[in-house]
Amino acid sequence: MVFERLRAIDWSDDSAAFDHANSRALLMREYLRRSALWARAYRAEQSWPFFDIAEHVDAELQTPPDVAAEVEEVLAGLAPTSLKRTCRAAIRWAALCDACDDLPADLPDPYEPLLLMYERGGGYFLEEYLDLNGVMIRLGNVESNASATPFVTLARATLDALDAEGQITYYAKVGEGYLRHNPRGIVRRRIDGGQTYDEAFTRHLRWEPTEYLRLYDLGHNEVDHVEITGIEAAAFIESVTAKILGPRGVAL
């Protein structure tokens, strides 16, 4: 399954990388967080961040030679070396999960966020910053990443809702009975090409134009709001989607 996912990726699709820049940045940060947790658990800090975690859990587990050969064909020509290392590691990790039923339950799947990031626009380049072909992020270190806020909302529809052009600021509508972790709604302000766009995430499960922020600035709206992170916005989007579509993704 992991191999088929890797084989289906268009590693040269730069337009997809730019279209999904926001979600790819969050997914990479989540991979860095998860891999940091595994590195600490198995005293592999020196190998972090792009390393073969299964090797530290069960060094005897090997990818079958025929599968390994196919993997190398898929990875031929890709760069950097660390990217190819993580692809091999993700396949080995899947084999470890199938073979081992006593992996630490308190540690999350390390490679799923990275696989999703690859699927949404290919790989990265590592220099002073991590360059994701659309956004650049700091690498940090094991401790800073292990203590980062988790990004656990990995549903593709949620990731799609986070991707948009321009500089984005999210706000949660708050008030009596509604705090930032359970707001009555969220809005975002996008500034793109000198134009400002205010949008609310609606029960139609999409962003739609709103006058809320403009009216608030004019003193005509008594509903208050606070600025929130993209991770918090994702949590709200996923909770609303679950309420409306239900666990099977069908409108209730």
Image (cartoon, rainbow, N blue to C red):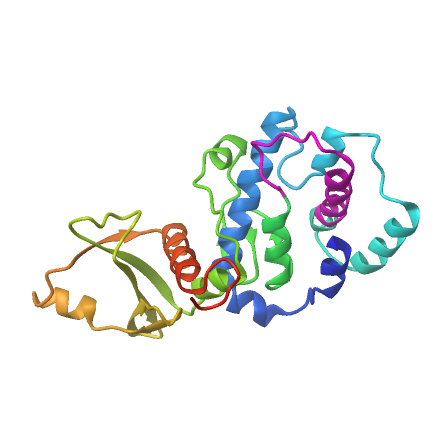
Q: Could one spot residue 126 in this view of the protein? A: no
Q: Farthest residue in the front direction?
A: 252
Q: Dividing the picture into quarters, in which one does residue 7 lie?
A: bottom right
Q: Farthest residue in the left direction?
A: 219
Name which residue lies at 85% across and 38% down: 62
Percent from the top left, x then y, of residue 4? 76, 60
> Is residue 172 magenta-colored?
no
Would residue 102 be found to the left or right of residue 191 on screen? right
Tell me: residue 182, above or below residue 8. Answer: above
Percent from the top left, x then y, of residue 21? 50, 62
Q: The C terminus is located in which quarter?
A: bottom left
In the foreground, 232 or 99: 99
Name which residue lies at 85% across and 43% down: 63
Tell me: residue 175, above or below residue 100. Answer: below
Q: Could one spot residue 226 in this view of the protein? A: yes
Q: The N terminus is located in which quarter?
A: bottom right
Would residue 85 be found to the left or right of residue 229 on screen? right
Would residue 82 be found to the left or right of residue 24 on screen? right
Name which residue lies at 68% across and 68% down: 12
Name which residue lies at 44% across and 58% down: 242
In the foreground, 52 or 243: 243
For the record, the magenta segment spans 85-110
Percent from the top left, x then y, of residue 186? 29, 60
